[in-house]
Amino acid sequence: MASSATLTTTHLPQLRTILDEWNAKRPTTKGFSVPLEQFQYAPNASKDVIVAFRTRPPLPNEAADKFHAEDDAPETGPVEFCAGITVTSAEPGVFVAHVPGMKWSGPTLTHKTYEADLAFAPDTENEEVYQRTVIANDMLSLALSGGVGCILAYGQTGSGKTYTMESVEHRVARDLFERARIMGKKFIASQGGDHPAAETGDIFEFGVTFLELLGKSASDLLETTEQVDEQGNPVRTEIAVREDKIGNVRPNLISSTVRSSEELEELINKALSHRRTSATLRNATSSRSHALLTITIKNTLLPYADEGQLILVDLAGSERYEDSKEHDKQRMDEAKENNKSLMNLKECVRAKAKMAAEDGFVHIPWRSNKLTMLLKPIFDIESRQPSKAMIIAHVSPHIQDTVHSTNTLSYAAPFKTVPPKPRGPQPYDAKDPRTWDHDKTIEWLTKQFTKNAMKSRLAEWKVKEKQAKLAGKTLKPLVEPAPGELDLGVDVLKICPPGSTAKNLGMLYTPQFVERCLEARTGETLRKDEVKSVAMDIIGDLFYLILTAKTRKRNEIMRSRKTIAVEETYGVSPRAGDPETMYDTEEFLEAQIFYATDWGKIIMAAKKKCDSEGKEWSLDVYPKTIEDMMQKFRAHRDAAAKQEAEKKAREEET
Ligand SMILES: Nc1ncnc2c1ncn2[C@@H]1O[C@H](COP(=O)(O)OP(=O)(O)OP(=O)(O)O)[C@@H](O)[C@H]1O
């Protein structure tokens, strides 16, 4: 293949002729299926990884500059633009890259086709790109519902990444608060509308960080610095990027709280101006660094739920080795590091896409690099947060850049996956809620609400028993109610209507499930805040069971790796093990009621000890912990029964 230098002005007319012949034969370009004004959600909205291509228009004088920069061939008049990319379909997205080559008979063109979910032509406005990516895939709602949405701009230096990402950032700032108000009002309404923020829907707290990763070193773009180094570059504190004790990656950045579009816009402008200053001073740093804007969102009415996140990433320009070999050592190291991180990112995105499409286990190597560590929430399969990643691959429109463009397109195209084909119902597995039918789901939900109702009955009974004792009376023992006799406080059939299963419930965001439980409330047996707290426990348990089922296979493969952390993310009690099969007894339920909140605490302490001693949790320590607890419970129960019997006998005697 010829380099662009050999394909200079003299060959352009021939290349144009070949391109015109190809264009004359190809079918007309397929546009978007629904015009922008009419559509609301994209057909791809359910996918975990969405890939889009974008090419920009040629800039004034760019075609000439591109030749003159590399070529000293004699000029034959003004250099006209020659297309290196043709968009043949917008949705699904198809780009054809025209790769120039050279034979003894003259220049040639090879037409390579690449497919994505969406493709944006040079005349597509930023607003349309934003609507068809961020809005169509419901990224704002995802983050406001405790999920993680990540948008990555990838491509060669100068291909338009910053142009796209800055526009996305400003538009997110414009729309996020309005969307939050709508969702906030809806959430309050589902609780009966009784809240000081019922009018405003103001229930979310927003935090913003902006990190720059240059080579291996991370810095805070919100840090204002007066200091400059010998070359005049601003000096910023180096930020450590590592996992903390509980596995979170939270670099120590300035996190600013924002309350409005204007405040968010101001911070974005501040960070971008710091990035631009660095870019001018340090020879286009922006193209050599990754910039990550993270917006964290906390629902103040669901204090135990995970924070939602929107992560907007303007990636460093992808450089070929040939382009960087003229650089000094520092630049070469940076380029090497960038390529490493981009390759690692590719592995992670590809694995995530594959996992979503095949519904199986795929190892995601997110710990291998700082960039992917920072994106842990979207790559960690142990995370309970729903997440979605969108990659927008940018290419230059010029024929001189096609070799670069094919690299970019072949990097991103494999991320496009076909949603898994319906394979019929999976065989029933008691341990895997994704295989439960409607009846089994209702049975499980009923059991969860019964557990809760029994807990409060027992608590009430204990109070009454105490009062009775004080009055010198004996209270009748608490009798186990017959199935269906207990008022659960909710209509489980409303939570899981006919036709719906645990798999459908597992796809709901936590606030959606809470809203549904609140709507299913019957009478006054449970207060609204009690429904909320039980709903949080139940959805937490369901996520845990699904997660355990998903990772079981992985755990078998990687037995040496640490087992799933039994974290109390949703503030609920028992989560470890598999009560469905191992301990599915009334006695087990009674023991949980007896231990109440201590149950979770004892299990957590045992898990911690087990980890520190490097023992095997699921097969060895966990059953032993449960057995010890059950023995204690039985001893207590038997002693209490004995005492009760003796008391009765004494009473009968007197
Ligand atoms: N879709 C577009 N329409 C019009 N102009 C564009 C478009 N995309 C990019 N540009 C212009 O192209 C130039 C290069 O774009 P940009 O700086 O975004 O590229 P980049 O990929 O971020 O480069 P770098 O890696 O160097 O940061 C800019 O002048 C920008 O304004």
Image (tube, rainbow, N blue to C red):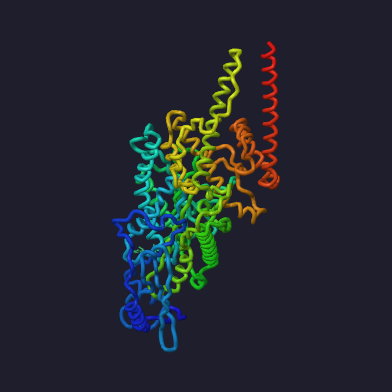
Total labels drawn: 0
**Image location of residue 362, percent across then percent down:** 57, 58
**Taking the image as four quarters, which one is ligand 1 found in?**
bottom left
Q: Based on the displayed image, in which of its 4 quarters is residue 574 positioned?
A: top right
Q: Nearer the viewer, residue 475 or 599?
A: 475
Residue projecting furthest to the bottom: 105
Rendered-image quadrant of the C terminus: top right
Q: Nearer the viewer, residue 127 or 422?
A: 422
At 42% from the left edge and 77% from the top edge, which residue is drawn? Answer: 99
Q: Is residue 557 above or below residue 177?
A: below
Q: Is residue 253 visible?
A: no
Q: Based on the displayed image, in which of its 4 quarters is residue 483 positioned?
A: top right
Q: Based on the displayed image, in which of its 4 quarters is residue 553 positioned?
A: bottom right
Q: Is residue 180 above or below residue 532?
A: below
Residue projecting furthest to the left: 37
Q: Is residue 28 above or below residue 372?
A: below
**Image location of residue 268, percent across then percent down:** 40, 51
Q: Nearer the viewer, residue 386 or 78?
A: 386
Q: Is residue 284 visible?
A: yes
**Image location of residue 118, percent across then percent down:** 39, 63
**Image location of residue 463, percent across then percent down:** 56, 21
Q: Is residue 515 above or below residue 104?
A: above
